[in-house]
Image (spheres, grey):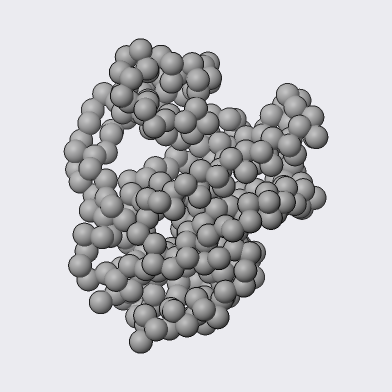
Amino acid sequence: MNNIFILLGPTASGKSRLSQKLADEFSFEIINADLYSIYKGLDIGTAKPSKKALIKNKHHLINKLEPTDEYNVSKYCHDVNKCINEITSLNKIPLITGGSMMYVYQLLNGLTHQYSTCDTDLKIIKYILKEYTNKQIIDAIRKYDHSLIKTLNKNDTYRIEKLLERLISSDSSFSKINGLYENTTFNITIIFINIKNRDILRNNIHKRTLDMIDDGLINEVKNLKYSFKLTHNHQSMRAIGYKETLQYLNHEITLKELINIITLSTQQLAKRQITWMNKFKIDFHYSYPDDEYEKLSDYVRYLLN
């Protein structure tokens, strides 16, 4: 059977560092599961692995897209399956890691439909997202069909956009994408970084925000904005850190507000990521911030032998 390892956890919990250590020790090739690390040029705000790390260990689905490109979960599932076939054909082991929980969940469990949107549909959706707040959009959908927004969070712009695509799409094609669990030749192991002390995570997030500002996040976004004529309507600029920095560059918020909003938004993201833990069949809980690498290493070695 082909082994596939998946390493999940909230932002700022050390997924990249841990995946690098595992790749150093075992025959892993890393498949990125962070939506925004797929984009070229989004380096500082995504905490993308360094150029040295990308060279040292083989990474897939990093720096794949231009900042103006659009991407979705069905494309991601297709791309990951292609990467898995490529990696296993070389007798290597795929290690999928990142914080885009919904993408990984759909990758494992499959997609039952795809919605096809034409250019006019996309323009309508972008206009709605620009002219109305998430709360206004949810309130409007509630009047149409309350059941559609039962589990929808007003801060979850991605899911709101996907729901708009579903409602507005001029054509629906129900071509099923099989999940990894349906392939009986795969032995899937899920490792989840479990947070014992939330205060430490919150402090890490705040420190990481300050480090990103010091490392040049504002200049990174400024260069992307002017080089590619990017606005908040582009998918790449909806990432935490980028959408707020665009606001700062547009003189809508101060530097202090920029730091506070990025920190708060990242903390909220981490909280949502932790709740995803209950949706996955987790095989190994890696305790953070405890250093349990030897225990994890022994577990991986046991599975591979």
Q: Nearer the viewer, residue 275 or 70?
A: 275
Would you identify the image quadrant in which residue 258 lies? top right
- Answer above or below: position of 166 versus 5: above
Residue 151 visible at all: yes
Work out which residue is located at the far bottom of the displayed protein and give it.
305
Q: Residue at x 50, y 48 (%)?
A: 273
Q: Residue at x 47, y 47 (%)?
A: 275
- Answer above or below: position of 217 versus 6: above
Quarter occupied by the C terminus: bottom left
Whole-percent x, y for residue 24 in the image: 54, 79
Whole-percent x, y for residue 292 in the image: 57, 74
Whole-percent x, y for residue 115 in the image: 28, 34
Would you identify the image quadrant in which residue 304 lies? bottom left
Q: Nearer the viewer, residue 22 or 282?
A: 282
Q: Residue at x 51, y 57 (%)?
A: 9
Whole-percent x, y for residue 47 in the image: 63, 55
